[in-house]
Image (cartoon, helix red, strand yellow):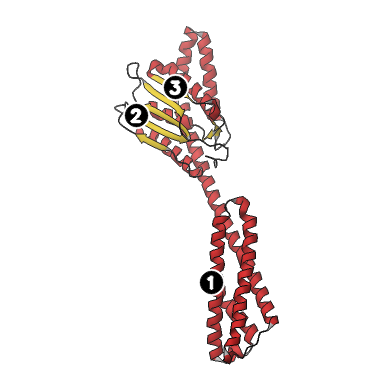
Amino acid sequence: MSFFVGPFTIGVNSLMLGALYFTDYRVFLTATAAAALIYATGFTTCSAVGVFLKRFFTGEEGIGLRLLVMVFLFLIIIVLFLELLFHGYKYIPFFQYTFNNTAFVWSLLGTGISAIFITFLLEGIARYEIWKNKMKESEQLSRANRQSRLQGLKSQVNPHFLFNSLNSLSSLIHEDEEKAEKFLDEMSKVYRYMLRNDDDELVMLITELNFVRSYYYLLKTRYGDGLQITINISPADYDKWLPPLTLQTIIENAFTQNVMTKDQPLHIQIAKSADGIVVCNNVQPKLISQKTDIESGIDNLVTRYSLLHQSRIVIEDSHTERVIYLPLFTCKTGGCA
């Protein structure tokens, strides 16, 4: 608002003092300094009130009430400072000034309307900046989701995985048709989940867990006792939300980087934590591991969570285990962690 001090100063002094304001240099300098001081102090007071009200009225639902209270207080402040200015000029002899009610009303109307206009203009600019930042975050989150889906899709639909799945299915057909049918059913669930076309930022925990169980069934058929995944989640948490393919990314990271044999099984535990879930696995690293591509999946997961209203994944690594804490959301928008 400081930008408007000059125009208001000249305008009000013109109304109050008339031609004398421009013909007597003493009047011009003194009146300009006095009015500028009054307006600068008044606008500074209004700015301080605006900042306080923004902190007091938080959230989208408080905008209308905040603006109403802000305009009301601004008008009171303007009246008080104009009263000080108009009555103060009577005590400066060479101003030859007497209170002019018409000039006061016009000054009050001009300053008040301008203050209201400036208030809504600045609020509009602030809302636009917030909207622009939200759009930017939404685009970043959408990009992170696409990257995550592509990463998961690449890991599942690559020829190596497909060959192993079909090879396992072929073996089961000859050994146990019932198990082969079960394997094919779980395999279809995995691919259906991976290939779905929706762009949901979050899915229900129960949906993700059902996918993990199907995914685990395929891996278990191949690795046998070399892989053990246990899920200990209360049904009370099933209706909470998390980014899709979150658990798949962590599981894939674990079995890709660690040895899995009958004598050295990989144990992955998915359990409830204080404000979400925790995924823990023992560490027995492979001698050769393409860690860069796999860790990029974890990095992407961290990015996705950070874009969901600043929710944060906590990763704790030691020589014997890796523990990952995942926040859960109580609503689909992600703002209710």
> Mark 2 and mark 1: span between their CA atoms?
59 Å
Choose the circle earlier in sequence order: 2 or 1: 1
Q: Residues within 10 Å of mark 1 (few under 14, many from 20)?
A: few
Indicate whether 290 appears above or below 163: below
The residue labelled by disc 2 is 321
Q: Residues within 10 Å of mark 3 (few under 14, many from 20)?
A: few
Marker disc for residue 2 = 1
Q: Quarter-wise, where is residue 219 in the image?
A: top left
Q: Residue placed at 54% from the left, 61% from the top?
A: 51
Choose the circle earlier in sequence order: 3 or 1: 1
Mark 2 and mark 1 residues within 8 Å of each other at the beta carbon = no
Q: Secondary structure at mark 1?
A: helix
Q: Secondary structure at mark 3?
A: strand
Mark 3 and mark 1 residues within 8 Å of each other at the beta carbon = no
Choose the circle earlier in sequence order: 3 or 2: 3
Given the image, on which type of amino acid does mark 3 rest? Thr
Report how many numbered discs are placed on residues in the image: 3
User: Residue 30: percent from the left, percent from the top?
Assistant: 53, 86
Q: Is residue 89 visible?
A: yes
The residue labelled by disc 3 is 230
Q: Secondary structure at mark 2?
A: strand
Given the image, on which type of amino acid does mark 1 rest? Ser
Query: Which residue is nearer to you in this view: 292 or 1?
Result: 1
Q: Is residue 128 visible?
A: no
Q: Quarter-wise, where is residue 34 in the image?
A: bottom right
> Mark 3 and mark 1: span between their CA atoms?
64 Å
Q: Residue placed at 62% from the left, 77% from the top?
A: 83
> Mark 3 and mark 2: span between their CA atoms?
15 Å
User: Residue 290: percent from the left, percent from the top?
Assistant: 35, 31
Q: Residue placed at 47% from the left, 7% from the top?
A: 175
